[in-house]
Image (cartoon, rainbow, N blue to C red):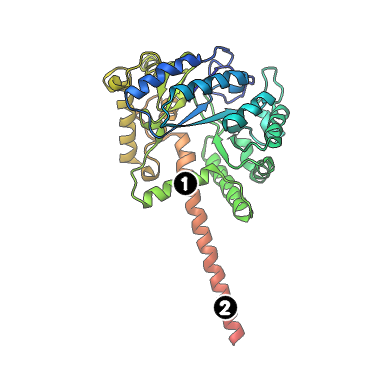
Amino acid sequence: MVQSTRFCNINCSYCYLPFRTDKSRFDVALFKPLFENLKRADLLGEQLTILWHAGEPLALPADYYREAFQALKEFCPKTVRLDHHLQTNAMLINDDHIALFQDWNVQIGVSIDGPAWLHDQNRMTRSGKGSHAKAMAGVKKLQEANIPFTCIAVLTAPALNHADELYEFFKSLGCYNVGFNIDEEESINETSTMRGKTIESAYKTFLKQIYRRIRADRNPLRVREFDNVSQSIGSWFDREAPNCTESNALSILSVDAEGNLYTFSPEFVDVVSEHYNDFKIGHVSDIVFEKLYETEPFASLNRDIKEGIYNCKQTCGYFDTCGGGVPSNKYFELGNLAGTETNFCRLTRKTMLDTVHEIIAEAHQARRVAEWELTETAQETSD
């Protein structure tokens, strides 16, 4: 994950980024030492995904990314396949950006919360105006250029009673996948509308209705949450060890606008923590990955995260399909990394799995009733 800029042109009520008025930008020349250090430590595999995120990346012009993409192409070994993903609020998309996406096959994710009445409750400009109209103008440019895109929507409590409206909205956009993030307590976003038993029940009802819409749709919208559960259950049947990518050191590397490096959860970028040195594991220009596990504060950070995974394994019946929880949520909700259940995992892991189990049980019961009714009808006919 590369933070090309901390700056964001809007001011979402649930945003966790603390420095989104900072207009500094990542120096693309720093990719050279970063890749030299990665190659020396043999940390590059066959494929590398670069996600431009953690600010509004399109606050920077297309020429910035042309320079960055060319630098990455030059510094990355030819044996490594590079994929570029970019997460945007779509408001600043212009013709130059469209040409960039086409020329470099950039995978686009659009952050949009649904129809205007819902979206504009939380995704506002700094002057308090809604951002939906400008976001839709950017989406229209993607549609007209036939550029495929995914969507991410943040679910707040008011959205849970409007599953049908949200499904229809994202279908109308033509996106090929939508993910429903929950409103999380993270960093400077210290409260969430998604808490409490009534929320758990409403979230389950929401998910079930989304699933009904998927089942009834001849060309259904793909929903990330159901795809993830399917993958988790499949891994369990295949006896694969559960794994949470964000708990696995160096599976994700995040680079902030100044070139500082982070790993584990990308949400640790720009977080103040005296104990963990603000979660920084080094700088792209001088990090020695081979010695990382021997140095502080990374060693403490890694040890505490592993303790949290161990504690989850000992206490949670959902561990085999989860792998131990997300470190950033433990840190922000519980105040430590060795904790276990968070509101985030209670909703997105436990409630999600319980919902799928109930959907399967209800479908099985419906089939049994239908078979019984068919048998009864046949018996009456024969009589």
Q: Residue furthest left?
A: 294
Q: How many marks?
A: 2
Q: x%, y% of residue 83?
A: 50, 32
Under circle 1, the secondary element is helix
Q: x%, y% of residue 175?
A: 63, 40
Name the residue: 64% across, 19% down: 9
* Front-lying residue, 343 or 240: 240
255 w.r.t. 146: above or below: above
Q: x%, y% of residue 174?
A: 66, 42
Under circle 2, the secondary element is helix
Tell me how far mark 2 sits from mark 1, CA to CA: 37 Å
The type of residue carrying mark 1 is: Val
Closer mark to the observer between disc 2 and disc 1: 1
The type of residue carrying mark 2 is: Glu
Asked if residue 8 can be seen in this view, the reply is no
Residue 147 location, quadrant: top right
Left or right? Give the position of 258 relative to 177: left
Q: Earlier in the sequence, mark 2 or mark 1?
A: 1
Name the disc covering residue 376, or none.
2
Q: What residue does disc 1 label?
A: 229
